Amino acid sequence: MNMDDQRSRRANADEHEGMVGRRTRSLLALVFAFAASMPVAAVGTYETGFEDPPIVAGPLAGQDGWFFGGTVQTSVVESGDQAVYVDGSTGFDAAARALDTPVGPLISVEVSFQVTGTTQTGISLFVDTGFLAQIVSLNSLVFLGNSNSNTPPQPLSQGTWHRLRIEFDFDAQEMEGFVDGSSLGVLAMNPAGGPAAEITDLSLYTFDAGGATQDVYFDDLSFVAPTAADIPTVSEWGLIVLALLLLTAGTIIVRREMTLRAA
């Protein structure tokens, strides 16, 4: 073999090696892009717009994990076709749901809310050691509360939808409340019965000892507790394995092409 032939073969080999590298990098990029784009499920997440399915109009108790009170109705909603009504004229009414979710490190709960009336209403959360926190609407004011203190009250308009949110930082042992994105302030986290291991329930409630009329509606509830690393579901793992098999097969094919052409 003369020098020109050797140079030609070396050039061809280099070209094929470059092709293998480019194809391999492209396949890897495809796999990683695919994996990064897959949705993941946060541990402890519960979201509902109180829509049908799975929730039908009528008493909420007994549907989708809810118990005690609340009525699903179609007349006053923020989005979709249904929302929950709690009746402030009965003394006490609440739509309650078990969560049974380990605490921390970061947990948030939010819900859309509309009130007409001046008696106490809001959203509250409970842990395995007792009461944890609530956002309270009372006398056209709103504030965040824990087991022994409240943030300074702020004005709250009636007859319109508001977005209530509580963020819990179990590492810092603090919580912060929000209304329509504006902070209500920060409070220390001090469950009534001591340090907690589990968030047990949430309640969308209204209360009036005097029997005053109050109409309260809740819609679009979200509870997110990423207490562990977000992980793909079983079906998503299957897609990852398939992508890796395709990567392996593609690498074998281009290497075989390189070997045959170099022979």
Image (cartoon, rainbow, N blue to C red):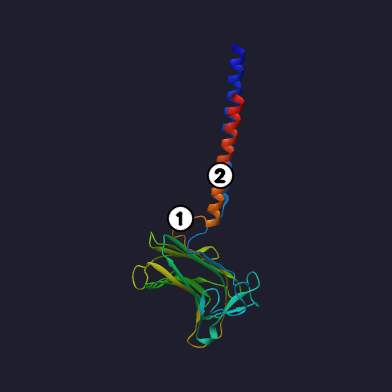
Viewer-proximal residue, 225 or 4? 4
Query: Residue 145's x, y, as percent?
Result: 43, 71
Q: Disc 2 on helix, strand or loop?
A: helix
> Relative to 142, is 25 above or below?
above
Q: Which quarter of the figure has residue 5?
A: top right
Query: Residue 97's x, y, as percent?
Result: 49, 74
Q: Which residue is mark 1?
A: 229
Name the quarter where the N terminus is drawn.
top right
What type is the residue that disc 1 sits on? Answer: Ala
Residue at figure coordinates x 58%, y 47% from the top left: 34
> Relative to 246, is 1 above or below?
above
Task: Count the numbered circles shown.
Answer: 2
Of callouts 1 and 2, the N-terminal one: 1
> For the residue carrying disc 2, how many other residues have a C-alpha within 10 Å: few (<14), some (14-19), or many (20+)?
few
Residue at figure coordinates x 62%, y 26% from the top left: 261
Which label number is shown at residue 74?
A: none
Residue at figure coordinates x 65%, y 70% from the top left: 80
Residues at badges 1 and 2 in contact (C-beta under 8 Å)? Answer: no
What type is the residue that disc 2 sits on? Answer: Leu
Cα distance, mark 1 to mark 2? 25 Å
Q: Which residue is mark 2?
A: 245
Viewer-proximal residue, 14 or 252? 252
> For the residue carrying disc 1, how many other residues have a C-alpha within 10 Å: few (<14), some (14-19), or many (20+)?
few
Q: Is residue 32 visible?
A: no
Viewer-proximal residue, 33 or 70? 33
Q: Disc 1 on helix, strand or loop?
A: loop
Q: Residue furthest top?
A: 2
